[in-house]
Amino acid sequence: MRGYFRKTEESDILPISENLRASDLEEIRIAAGLPPHDCLMYGYKESDECNTIVLDGVPSAMFGITR
């Protein structure tokens, strides 16, 4: 498995939101009460910095910094 991270692109959100682990879905439900795609989009738009982890060429996770 080959991985790296880069600045998030809006097109990363759909594939990530469709492949979340059960624990990630539960965290989103508890913390935000939003559908996964909406929650990730909000994070993307509101973060001071937002990055995507890419594994074997597939956007797989997001992380970032927000206030």
Image (cartoon, rainbow, N blue to C red):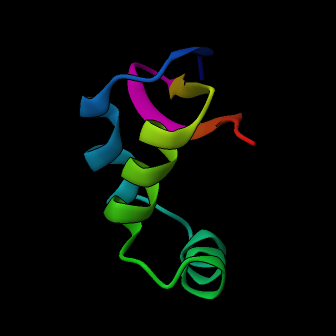
Position of residue 35 measured from the top left corner of the image (x, y, whole percent): 36, 76
Q: Is residue 56 magenta?
A: yes
Position of residue 27 measured from the top left corner of the image (x, y, whole percent): 66, 77
Horizontal placement of 46 versus 49: left or right? left
The residue located at (65%, 78%) in the rendering is 31
The residue located at (64%, 87%) in the rendering is 30
Q: Is residue 53 magenta?
A: no
The residue located at (52%, 26%) in the rendering is 55
Q: Which quadrant is home to the N terminus?
A: top right
Q: Which quadrant is home to the C terminus?
A: top right
Position of residue 64 measured from the top left corner of the image (x, y, whole percent): 67, 33
Q: Which residues are magenta?
A: 55-61
Q: 40 or 17, which lies in front?
A: 40
Q: In which image quadrant can residue 66 be found?
A: top right
Position of residue 2 measured from the top left corner of the image (x, y, whole percent): 59, 15
Main SS of the magenta part reads strand
Looking at the picture, does residue 66 appear above or below residue 35?
above
